[in-house]
Amino acid sequence: MSPLDRIANVSTLKQHEVDKLYKVEHKPVVSTSDQLCFLIRPRIQTVKWICDVANADKAAGRFRRYKIIFTPRKFYACEAMLEEQGIFGEVTTDEWSFCLLPLDDDVISMELPEFFRDNFLAGDQRWVRTAGSALHLLHSLYGPFSKLYGIGRCSKMAYESWREQVEEGEQTARRAEIGKVFLIDRDVDFVTPLCSQVVYEGLVDDIFRIKCGCVEFGPDVTSSDKSLKVMLNSQDKVFNEIRNEHFSNVFGFLSQKARNLQGAYDKRRGMDIKQMKAFVSEELKGLKQEHRLLSMHIGASESIMKKKTKQDFQELLKTEHSLLEGFEIRESISFLEEHISRQVSMMESLRLLCLLSITENGLLPKDYRSLKAQYLQSYGADHLLTFSNLRQAGLLAEQPAGEALSAMESKVGKLVNDKTAGKLTDAFSSLARKSNFRALSRKLNLVPKSDEEYDLRVPRDMAYIFSGAYVLLSCKLVEQVLERDGWTGMDEVTRLLNGHEFAVTGSSGADARTQGDARRVVLVMFLGGCTFSEISALRFLGREKGYKFIVVTTAITNSSRLIESLLGNQI
């Protein structure tokens, strides 16, 4: 499902005299209509394609009217392309400032999946203004924010863009409905999206791909020969109760739900005519709807179970947990090598490689060269550009040879002979190569002690999201900053995260106009994408601490989408 489908479906568009709809596929347009309207993202290659369509019509002696609607913004570069191709005067252009799509009661998406690649790989900051505009729209609708916190270069620029727009616009006094705002860049926490999701909603996204809050279940789920498109949100009562649950708890809940439903059906036995009439008119329709939803989610769970209870997946999770804890790294590398050589999954291999690199603050040169060579041999040399992109985005790194130990070796060498220095250097090597993730993990207690039994049925913290192995860094930062009302006492953490943190008071008098429940409403904005695991973690944190979190994200992401956006075959 596309964002347009959520706003105006085909029948609605046809009511407004839209004859036919075509997907932008960069192919010749076969249409008898004398007017073409293009609803597009402001992309140079798409505008070039429209120019080619118009020029082809001109060469064929065909007259048509063309209209281009850019969303969410119109860029000068696109208009320059129209002028360069000689059709600027023949095309009318417009702008549709569509920047926020509510996916659920507490989730709003900007539906800008390209934000991550453009900003964090290409360094193109064109969407920062759009993020600032989205924040400004929320500010104008729900009153002044009392406090704004953030971390990351992009977050700081989005905040500054928002501040400029507030100063330029009219100031209206209104009662605040949102208390605090937290902005966070995706590159502050790459570990979380690279981990396998094990909460129900995250697993559904990983396996079936949720698009704009809608998922398409195939015949294996629907137990028929047809696929079914389903909206997944809080309106689905069954889904709403299991979406944030660890998958190991889902079947137990669905079984209990089925028993309760059967009990509700069994009530009709022994009813007189009046009671039966009331049952049919008041309860039966709701029970049938619940029965349909229940059977669908049981089918989805069975499909997930078949894919995720295989030996390979269990070993994959074990390897992930080892990487997060920093144990058995050589065994993890051996598992990754086998994974690559068996060609289990191109994307999974890249994901594990990136997770290994980030948790270890880069790969040793010999490991990097070896794993890269094996991957290219298995999946083709055209992935050389993919490796370059991953390095540039900060997902994959090679430790500079000897850099970490040079200072230590020089000091030790002055005190002892070469042989002893060599032994001491080996002893210090593990200490010197510990990553920022390891240091952050210790500072923020991101990895719970493995000797303690973790009860997933009664979670005690956000670690349940990843089977008790890891507390999400992004959500832990939100928790800590809200507790401290800023970054006070977190100097070491912000240094390890490369700074760009800020904590500012909102509009003057905003705190006074933020009363009661609004003080506990926190808007968290992810720039570069947010996972369903992070949304589930924030919901859990909200229940534990008494907050109401609203998540705004440039797009919903997961490990596959993150890696796919950096593949070398993208233009």
Image: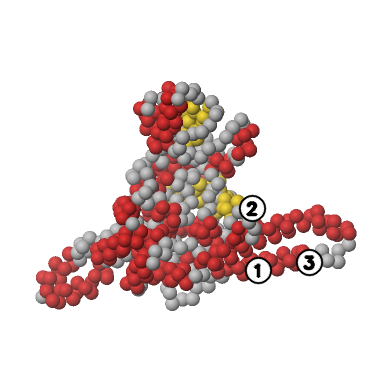
- Where residue 357 appears, as percent x and y from the top left, is 33, 62
Mark 1 and mark 3: Cα distance apart in space:
17 Å
507 or 432, which is in the foreground? 432
Judge from the rendering whether residue 392 lies leftward or rightward of residue 506; answer left or right. Answer: left
Residue placed farthest to the front in the image?
A: 60
Q: Does the image show residue 552?
A: yes
Q: Quadrant of residue 269?
A: bottom right
Res 235 label = 2
* Residue on which disc 3 sits: 266
Kind of residue sitting beneath label 2: Gln
Q: Earlier in the sequence, mark 2 or mark 3?
A: 2
Q: How crowded is mark 3: few (under 14 residues within 10 Å), some or many (20 or more)?
A: few
Q: Name the residue located 63 percent from the left edge and 67 percent from the top edge.
A: 253
Question: Which of the labelled discs sits on residue 255, or is there none?
Answer: 1
Give the foreground label among 2 and 1.
1
Q: What residue type is labelled 3?
A: Asp
The answer to which of 265 and 101 lies nearer the viewer is: 265
Q: Which amino acid does label 1 sit on?
A: Ser
> Reading the chain from its start, which is encountered first: label 2 or label 1?
2
